[in-house]
Amino acid sequence: MNSGSKKLQLSFNSPVILVFTIACFAVLFLDKVTGGISTNALFSVYRSSLLSPLTYFRFFGHVLGHADWEHFIGNIMLILVVGSLLEEKYGSLNILFVILSTALVTGMINFIFFPHIRLLGASGVVFAFILLASFARARDGKIPVTFLLVAMMYIGGQIYEGIFIKDNVSNITHIAGGVVGLSLGFIMNKNKMNRY
């Protein structure tokens, strides 16, 4: 046996992303068990009384809820790929802050401007991560052309879909998530808030 050979081991390289993924899975499983009652009560945001503590929980909890397995897989696949890379670069606390900030901003926008629409899902977080990842390579005042291309295609696509395609996708939430990712990316890069 070769003494220089190494055994493969599991690496929990992105604890925040892994916990977020498990939480989203558990919430969707609970949704199926309760027939949607749990998701409606805790994991989607809509206009409700400001006197209810659940209203404030839903401002954050809505990113854990998903309509079905397809919705869950679509969001989580991107979060696992992009989010884990970002967590390795910026660290767990910064990525947790991005997730919570995106949840709060998108939740409040929906609460204020779309009172009769129930918002749930992590797509705002996905788009925050996409623009944060695109901005992650900015250094010394130089903005990568790839970032500009992603930003233009992303924002243009969301505006086009919002105007011409009528579906159940919240384009405003995607744009708001992207703006959060862009803003925090600018701040984190300017203050060199990464692990390196």
Image (cartoon, rainbow, N blue to C red):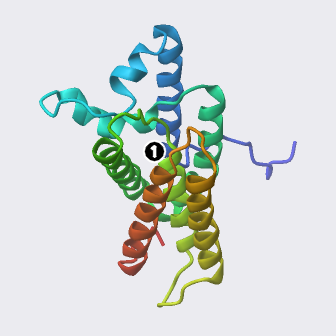
Is residue 82 visible in the rendered image? The answer is: no
Q: Which residue lies furthest to the right in this view?
A: 1
Residue situated in front as seen by the camera: 159 or 57: 159
Relative height, residue 94 to residue 110 (above, below): below
Question: Where is residue 58, by image quadrant?
Answer: top left
Question: Where is residue 191, by image quadrant?
Answer: bottom left
Q: Position of residue 151 (x, y in %)?
A: 58, 71
Q: How many marks?
A: 1
Q: Position of residue 7 (x, y in %)?
A: 74, 42
Residue drawn at 39 percent across, 22 percent down: 40
> Mark 1 sits on what residue?
16
Question: Where is residue 12, by image quadrant?
Answer: top right
Q: Which residue lies furthest to the bottom in this view?
A: 141
Residue drawn at 15 percent across, 34 percent down: 50
Is residue 52 visible in the rendered image? The answer is: yes
Q: Residue furthest front?
A: 164
Instruction: Bin the neighbour count of mark 1 within 10 Å (Cα to Cα): few under 14, some 14-19, many 20 and up.
Output: many
Q: Where is residue 59 in the image (x, y as percent from the top left)?
A: 30, 39
Q: Where is residue 92 in the image (x, y as percent from the top left)?
A: 42, 53
Q: Which residue lies furthest to the left in this view?
A: 51
Q: Which amino acid does label 1 sit on?
A: Val
Assign a secondary structure to mark 1: helix
Residue drawn at 53 percent across, 89 percent down: 142
Residue drawn at 87 percent across, 42 percent down: 1
Relative height, residue 76 to residue 81 (above, below): above
Apparent side of residue 143 relative to residue 41 in the rendered image (left or right): right
Apparent side of residue 103 relative to residue 170 in the rendered image (left or right): left
Residue situated in front as seen by the camera: 96 or 73: 73
